[in-house]
Image (cartoon, rainbow, N blue to C red):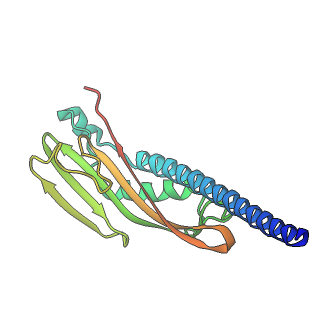
Amino acid sequence: MKKSEGKVGTIVGFYMLMFFVVILATNMQVSQFRATKTFVEDALATSNLASAIIDIETYGINNYLVIADFNKAYNTYKSALKINLDLDENWECPNKAAISGKVEILDYIIYNIWGNDIEEYHFDENGVMSYSYIIGGLGSIKGPEGTVIEATSIYSKIGFFIDGILEIHVNAENEKLVDIVNSK
């Protein structure tokens, strides 16, 4: 009887140890994902702000903060993102600590506010720009992540891979909208 009890205790102890190892590994992975999310969100916010090239003449004439040169803004965003995420010429992170594989720009949108109207310049994942003008859209139009557009804003979304536990590659996306606020 004592031998059976010892075997059961050993087996239960082994499974308890395995349970705690799995919980510890999962917590470490979740912490890594949170750190990567914060790092990428900060890089997106600063890259969006870097591309907020305001037309000073328009601001001086009618007090509207708008981004007139949307192509220059998009190219500035790409340069800033590359620097902020420490990407190489292939748009990959050389140290692969936070991001593994190629980073792709999925969306980049400039929302210019003209009174109560919204002018939208949208660059897709291929870098192709589309344009729309929404009359009376201020306060009723939402960005892709759900934020109501109330000021000239820039939105971006990127996709990338994160290395997970046991060499599992996790597909991730992150997005950010920043407002360019006029303090009237």
Q: Quadrant of the N terminus?
A: bottom right
Q: Locate residue 132, reporting x and y percent.
A: 17, 59
Name the residue nearer the viewer: 59 or 27: 27
Q: On the image, which quarter does residue 76 sit in?
A: bottom left
Check the image and report above or below for 153 versus 33: above
Residue name at image x 19 percent, y 52 percent = 119
Q: Residue furthest front?
A: 1
Residue name at image x 69 percent, y 61 percent = 25
Residue name at image x 59 percent, y 51 percent = 35
Q: How many marks?
A: 0
Name the residue nearer the viewer: 127 or 142: 142
* 157 left or right of 109 in image: right
Q: Residue furthest right?
A: 3
* 19 left or right of 120 in image: right
Q: Quadrant of the C terminus?
A: top left
Q: On the image, which quarter does residue 13 sit in?
A: bottom right
Q: Locate residue 90, reporting x and y percent.
A: 57, 71
Residue name at image x 9 percent, y 50 percent = 135
Q: Residue furthest top?
A: 184
Check the image and report above or below for 34 versus 152: below
Name the residue nearer the viewer: 136 or 29: 29
Q: Locate residue 82, reporting x and y percent.
A: 53, 59
Q: Locate residue 125, reporting x and y percent.
A: 37, 70
Q: On the image, which quarter does residue 113 sit in?
A: top left
